[in-house]
Amino acid sequence: MFFGVKDCTAYMHSVDATCVLPFLRGRDFKIDEMTGMKDGEEINLLWEGEAPLWVRNNHEVEINGILEEDDMNSINNLLIDFDNGDFINYSYGVFAVRCADMVRLKTICIKLLEQYSYFAAESIWAFVIEQNEQMPIYFVQCVEESNIEEGLIRMLASTKEEPEY
């Protein structure tokens, strides 16, 4: 898994589509694109011929709908806009979310990291945000806070070999 934060945008690789759900909580949003797999073919999971609509109330209904679609059709692509210019772009395990509210971005990203067994999520966030590039955080998966230093050094050394954004 790779993780990076740059210009109020967090990037994660090797995640599933449900990682977008916490970012939708309590916010107005519009789903511009949602595709998934059905019978081995990629299909549009939105209403054909209908312009995307803003979800301004009953957010939980739409969020639950995304969860159900992923269960039934394994979502491959999601493009979601927020009315303040923020966005979500998910495509085949690669996730980008722009969130101008850095406190919200940090809080949700830390929870996601913990969900994916990154136990020292606070330290990972603090380290990655200072690097201004995507980092291979698989070096620190399941590592406790007290043992994180060696993994952070390995992450940094590895990024010298990896392409930037």
Image: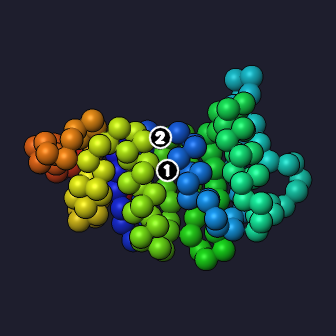
Say whether disc 2 or disc 1 marks the residue closer to the N-terminus.
2
Question: What residue would you read off at disc 2?
Answer: 15
Above/below status of 132 relative to 13? below
Residue 56 visible in this rendered orientation of the protein: yes
Residue drawn at x 72%, y 38% is 69
Quadrant, the C terminus: bottom left
Name the side, left or right, on which 61 lies relative to 94.
Answer: right
Instruction: Identify the image quadrant of residue 1.
Output: top left
Q: Residue furthest right?
A: 49
For the residue pair 67 and 131, the one nearer the viewer reads as 67
In the rendering, at what x and y percent does residue 148 appear?
Answer: 16, 45
- How far is disc 2 from disc 1 in space, using C-alphas? 7 Å
In the rendering, at what x and y percent does residue 154 appear?
Answer: 14, 43
Question: What residue would you read off at disc 1?
Answer: 95
Residue drawn at x 87%, y 48% is 48
In the rendering, at what x and y percent does residue 124 appear?
Answer: 26, 53
Residue drawn at x 59%, y 51% is 21
Above/below status of 42 relative to 44? above
Tell me whether the residue at label 2 lies in contact with that at label 1, contact meaning CB atoms closer than 8 angstroms. yes
The kind of residue on which mark 2 rests is Val
Name the side, left or right, on which 105 lies relative to 2.
Answer: right
Q: Which label belongs to residue 144?
A: none
Name the side, left or right, on which 134 lies relative to 79.
Answer: left
Q: Which element carries disc 2, helix, strand or loop?
A: loop
Q: Which element carries disc 1, helix, strand or loop?
A: strand
Instruction: Identify the image quadrant of residue 116.
Output: top left
Q: Residue furthest bottom?
A: 84
Residue drawn at x 64%, y 55% is 79
